[in-house]
Image (cartoon, rainbow, N blue to C red):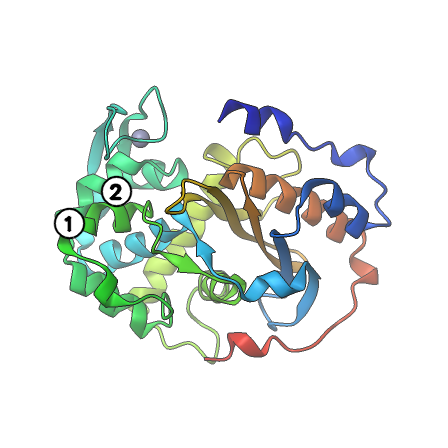
Amino acid sequence: MSNIFLFFIVFFAKLDTSDIDNYLKQWLNKEDYVFLFNPETKEEIYQYNKKNISISVPIGSITKIWTTFVALKRYPHLKNHTHNCQHIEGENRCWDKKGHGILNFREAFANSCNQFFNSIAEHIEFTVWFDELRAKGVFLNISYNNFFEKDKQSVFRGDNPKLVANGFDLAWMIYIVYNEGKAKDLTFSEKEINVLKTIKSWMRDVVLEGTVKGAKYKPNSFSGKTGTATDENGRYYGVFIGFINDPPLAIVVSLKDRIGSNASWIASDLFYFFTKRDKKIKKKNQLNSLKR
Ligand SMILES: [Zn+2]
């Protein structure tokens, strides 16, 4: 794993800012993609390897956004839950080899602590998790029948290769959180809106103190969530979803054979490009796939 980190250091200051395609060509392979859109209007702004956007990949810990949504909505006492993460080898180990130590929910979200999410799984019913998310158009592409009670911890922490999403599914997730459930085509209750506000602020903490803190360019509103997954063959997938609000820009980055933090660095660089080049951004087609 360490070679992935070392290899993937990005120096955006040295890049030719006039050519985003050339920049991405350096870092992305033919199976990867980048997708930028306006999270207020759903307008597409930029795609790289566009044909891949509709291909589903395992999304890893991005799933934690939705476990958090269900937990805080349906089991509000869990907001005060804490857990002492000690890593511990085996199926339920945390990715952090030192262990995260004692974490509250906000810290566990920012650092994507697997053990914390294992520890809340026993408080949340599996059927509630699926029903809540399907009602919001999240994880519509996965089959409920593929999951069993024994999968609960791996699903809730996002460490299950059957949890897949394509770029439009991921854009939909950003759209919900960015707008705090309040856009006119979203139907979220006051209670749910408050939960989404909490999640949005915690996605800011992912950048400030969590798995994205290594990114070089971190504008004030930069928020997001990383996901690292392996498929049935042990192949790595690094995914990042995130946004800034001035100008309103949302991004999905999907990379094979990388980890989620790597994907967040690509996003960081593209936010740099696009905030510097904002006046040149052309409005493009409406993002029809987001209309559900
Ligand atoms: Zn941990």
Q: In screen coordinates, is 85 left or right of 139?
A: left
Secondary structure at numbered mark 2: helix
- Residue 147, picture quadrant: bottom left
Q: Ligand 1 shows up in which quadrant of the image?
A: top left
State the residue position of label 2.
117
Q: Quadrant of the C terminus?
A: bottom left
Q: Residue at x 16, y 54 (%)?
A: 124
**From what the image shows, is residue 73 above or below residue 94?**
below
Graded by Cα atoms within 10 Å as few (under 14), some (14 to 19) or many (20 or more), the crowding at tag 2 reads: many
Graded by Cα atoms within 10 Å as few (under 14), some (14 to 19) or many (20 or more), the crowding at tag 1 reads: few
Amino acid type assigned to the residue bearing label 1 in the image:
Lys
Asked if the residue at label 1 sits under 8 Å from ligand 1, the reply is no
Q: Residue at x 30, y 31 (%)?
A: 94
Q: Residue furthest front?
A: 233
Residue 63 appears at what percent x and percent y? 36, 52
Amino acid type assigned to the residue bearing label 2 in the image:
Phe
Mark 1 and mark 2 lie on one chain; the one further toward the N terminus is 2
Between residue 281 and residue 33, name the one nearer to us: 33
Q: In screen coordinates, is 9 left or right of 115?
A: right
State the residue position of label 1.
150
